[in-house]
Amino acid sequence: MYKDLDPILHSQLRLAVISLLVKNSKMEFNDLKTETKATAGNLSAQLKKLEQAKYINISKSFKNNYPLTKAEITKTGLLAFEEYVKRIQEYLK
């Protein structure tokens, strides 16, 4: 019997963000936007959902007088990603 996939990670953009953070641990908002080709508004909304699920931490600061937002994967997010991949692999068997 197939297990349900995590609805938080089953979104294409949220999965792309988590995948990038698994590889890089922490990334700036603009780098995530470039890599995912998402609009700023959509990416911001999806980051909030990932943060609410405790899959990422968001930090805000300034760099050269410009706002700087960074996203960092949490242990919870890493475990959720690993479980998601495991369940996808089970579908493929």
Image (cartoon, helix red, strand yellow):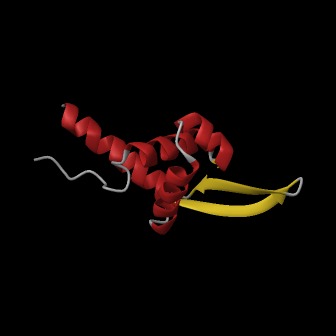
Q: Is residue 28 visible?
A: no
Q: Is residue 54 above or below residue 7?
A: below
Residue 22 occupies which quadrant of the picture?
A: top right
Q: Is residue 2 above or below residue 62?
A: above
Residue at the top extreme, as displayed: 93
Q: Is residue 92 above or below residue 4?
A: above
Image location (x, y in percent) of residue 91: 20, 37
Image location (x, y in percent) of residue 33: 59, 42
Q: Residue at x 60, y 62 (%)?
A: 57
Q: Residue at x 62, y 47 (%)?
A: 25
Image quadrant in which the C terminus is located: top left
Q: Is residue 6 visible?
A: yes
Image location (x, y in percent) of residue 59: 69, 63
Q: Is residue 59 above or below residue 13?
A: below
Residue at the left extreme, as displayed: 1
Residue at the bottom extreme, as displayed: 52
Q: Residue at x 67, y 44 (%)?
A: 30
Q: How many marks?
A: 0
Q: Is residue 91 left or right of residue 56?
A: left
Q: Nearer the viewer, residue 18 or 81?
A: 18
Q: Residue at x 27, y 39 (%)?
A: 88
Image location (x, y in percent) of residue 6: 31, 54
Q: Is residue 69 left or right of residue 47?
A: right
Q: Nearer the viewer, residue 78 or 17?
A: 17
Residue 87 occupies which quadrant of the picture?
A: top left
Q: Is residue 35 left or right of residue 15?
A: right
Residue at the right extreme, as displayed: 64
Q: Nearer the viewer, residue 74 or 27?
A: 27
